Amino acid sequence: MLKRTILSKKFWMYFFAYLLAAIMVFPLLWMLISSFKPPGSTVTVLNQLLSAPFSLESYQAVLRPDGTAMMWRWTFNSVLVGVVQTVVTVLFSSWAAFAVSRIPFKGKGFIFVFTFIGLMVPMESIVVPLFNMIVDLNWVNTYHALIWPGMMLPLAFLILKQFIDQLPNELLEAAKIDGAGFFTMWAKIILPLSKSSMAAVSIFIFIQSWNNLLWPLLVAQERSMMTLPVGIPTFQSNFATDLAIPMASNVVASIPALIVFLLFQKHIIRGIALSGIK
Amino acid sequence: MLQLTDKTNEQIISVSAYKRKETIRNYATAALFLAPFMVLYIWFWIYPIIQGFITSLTTGSYGVEQNFVGLSNYAYMLTDNKFWVSFGNTLYFILISTPTIVVLGLIMALIVNSKLKGTTILRSAFFMPYMLSISVVGSIWVFILQSRTGLLAETFQLFGYTMEISWFGSWGMGWLSILIATLWWTVGFNMILFLAGLQEIPEEIYEAADIDGASSWEKFRYITFPSLRGVTALVILLQTIASFKLFGQTFLITNGGPGISTTPLVHYIYQVAFRQWDMGYASAISFVLFLVISLIAFIQYKVLMKKD
């Protein structure tokens, strides 16, 4: 009797957990299957969706270089912006964090508070003056405009500073006795030790950059300068009922992010945990 | 540091000279390490805040002369019905999204942290949507929900029911659509925060409770839930900030409509600035948004500091 209730309780837990997972995955699965239907087919009726014909025509339509969708270019733009933003943010923040954490000088408290203000400033509340700056600099429709504003400098700085603070002092003392300069200390000691923190922060920044819509929407007005989040809606608005082609473009746009997810699962999760709690 | 056995005057002078030299060198090195960070940070974060505030005291647009008008943009805001509607919309979204995200995120974290088989697969399934770009999320949910030709309506049709719901046609249904899409997209993020909190609870407490014969509900009620208080506060605060920044979902799914019934604050700023080109007024609303979010972020800082 007792055993039976435990068994059935376990059964219901499995049932509920996997039902929830199925609901979460279903839209993704639908997107994937729809994208393999020929252009113009009905993908919203389930029995028609699962029966033949299947083809790669929708992908060909989306990826054709002369088409209205510039998927290759947009993906390139998104990747370029994401990679440059990530590398620059993490590198600059790591230097700054190292200086505040390990080089003796006065005014550290001020720098800490000054940086903390940045955490409280959402991009959304400064887009208007930022856009005015970009216009004045003549940067509209350039990579400069896409890349330089909207990096997550304060967050990266504070996470990396917290990490460097925890490192034992003996390591750097030993290096100092050996006559190492500060740059050598950063390159030979700090950088290798904070690799995993940096990886976690990097991937988190990359996801944020990859998903950013508002800023590129403002500064990338030419089709060739758009990133995926901006380009895809402009392209999809041409399709009212034919969903196979839009779905193929959704899949193409999601592949890089899903690859990042599969390769760096652990780092992504650590990045989120770091960004919130520590 | 240096041990001086024989303190002659000369040595003391040379030591203090050495120290002064070292201090100067430290400042120079620190400045070099900080410079790239500070240049970008001041240029693209601090300067725009100041510039935005100055712009909020002016009228005018591109090609039109800027005039100093004092606080009149702010005075206008008080009587601007659209501002209050979009502010109210934002508060409404906080009200409906926060409880759902907290509860669902916690449930998912508990599932993934349990001893069920296949938790890695479950974790991936719950988290995967977060990796998608907002345009993909928006388009998937428009295609699922749109009336008559959407996946949901067609599926009901397949089983012989007609579903006459206009998902984007009213205030209530519009916000429900945005809530569903947001929930699906971001719940995995909150799950990870809860999971990190769960993993900090020492296993021994549960073992002790087992010995005392505590039921699973009692364990949740008296161990898990109190331990997660900090994380829950964090999730609520992050969710509130995210709701104040809401833009992509309304822009892509309902386009703020019908009318302005699903237009949140950032969307309204976007319209005022980049559709009506009223930079002064848009800056004034932005400054209010900035103050509100700073206040929440400040509370978040206080909450987190208390934990340590």
Image (tube, coloured by chain):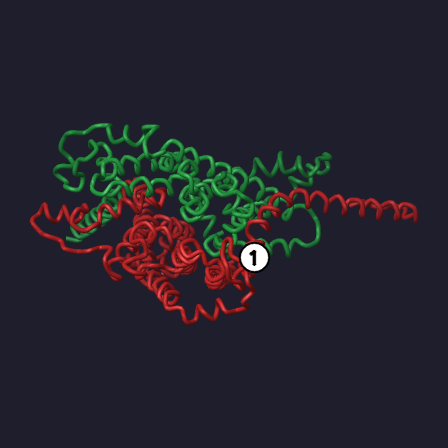
Q: Determine which quarter of the picture holds residue A186.
A: top right
Instruction: Return the chain for callout 1.
Output: B
Q: Position of residue A198 (x, y in %)?
A: 52, 40
Task: Determine which residue is flagged by label 1.
Answer: B51
Residue at the front extreme? Answer: B64
Q: Nearer the viewer, residue A271 or A165?
A: A271
At label 1, which amino acid type do we have?
Answer: Gln
Q: Position of residue A134 (x, y in %)?
A: 52, 47
| In the image, residue A278 above or below residue B91 | above
Circle 1 residues within 10 Å: few <14, some 14–19, many ≥20: some
The chain painted green is A
Q: Nearer the viewer, residue B69 or A28?
A: B69
Q: Is residue B161 left or right of residue B110?
A: left
Q: Residue at x 45, y 54 (%)?
A: A124
| In the image, residue A160 above or below residue B57 | above
Does any portion of residue B299 appear in the rendered image? no
Q: Nearer the viewer, residue A131 or B308?
A: A131
Q: Position of residue B87 (x, y in %)?
A: 38, 64
Q: Is residue B100 left or right of residue B201?
A: left
Q: Position of residue A21 (x, y in %)?
A: 26, 45
Q: Nearer the viewer, residue A228 or B305?
A: A228
The chain painted red is B
Does any portion of residue B152 appear in the rendered image? yes
Residue at the left extreme? Answer: B160
| In the image, residue B126 above or below residue B168 | above
Is disc 1 placed on a helix, strand or loop? helix
